[in-house]
């Protein structure tokens, strides 16, 4: 099991938590919580050994915008491709930052 911790500059935290995906064959789970203002953290746990450089490159591109929301992201991976990583993080970000109409989120 590989682990990786990354940190990025960010804006303000989003209003809510989010979950995207499931840990299963070839997929991953993204747990996202509001982070500390000005800082995003990403913790990756993967079943695939020797992929820290790939993970770092993918996550660096996702968090390249310093004005993105400040989040604490936990990723539990079971061999997902970089495209799935980007999709799941985007889904979680959309859920966490979605504006509500006063009813259910």
Image: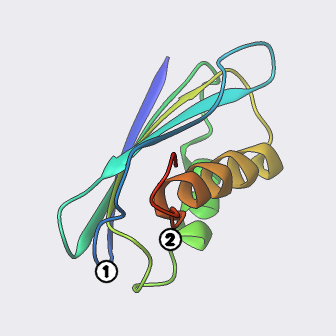
Q: Residues within 10 Å of mark 1 (few under 14, many from 20)?
A: some
Residue 32, image quadrant? top left
Mark with earlier residue (1, 2): 1
Percent across and percent down for residue 61 are 61, 72
Q: Nearer the viewer, mark 1 or mark 2?
A: 1
Instruction: From the image, tell me which residue sits under label 2.
Output: 63
Horizontal relation, residue 81 to residue 95: left or right: right
The residue at 31%/80% (across/down) is 11
Q: Position of residue 46 (x, y in %)?
A: 56, 26
Rendered residue at 57%/49% (across/down) = 92
Kindly identify the residue that appears in the image at 71 percent across and 55 percent down.
86
What is the distance, in whole Å, between disc 1 and disc 2 at their CAs?
Answer: 11 Å
10 Å neighbourhood of mark 2: few (<14), some, or many (≥20)? some
Please say if 55 is above or below 10.
Answer: above
Do tag 1 and tag 2 residues touch (Cβ < 8 Å)? no
| Residue 75, percent from left and from top | 50, 35
Instruction: Describe the element under mark 1 as helix, strand or loop.
Output: loop
Q: Residue at x 49, y 64 (%)?
A: 97
Residue 39, placed above or below residue 16:
below
- Residue 67 marker: none
Question: Under tag 2, what secondary structure?
Answer: loop
Give the residue at the far left of this rendering.
36
Residue 4 in sight in this render: yes
Coordinates of residue 22 in the picture (x, y in percent): 66, 21
Left or right: 61, with 85 as reference point? left
Asked where in the image residue 10 lies, by quadrant, the reply is bottom left
Q: Which residue is mark 1?
A: 11
Q: How many marks?
A: 2
């Amino acid at each position: 099991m590989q682990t990786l911790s990354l940190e990025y500059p960010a804006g303000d935290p989003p209003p809510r938590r989010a979950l995207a995906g499931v840990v299963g064959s070839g997929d991953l789970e993204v747990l996202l919580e509001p982070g500390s203002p000005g800082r995003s953290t990403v913790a990756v746990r993967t079943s695939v050994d020797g992929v820290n450089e790939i993970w770092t490159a993918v996550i660096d591109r996702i968090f390249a915008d310093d004005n993105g929301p400040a989040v604490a992201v936990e990723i539990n991976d079971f061999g997902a491709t970089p495209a799935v990583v980007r999709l799941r993080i985007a889904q979680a970000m959309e859920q966490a930052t979605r504006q509500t109409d006063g009813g259910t989120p």
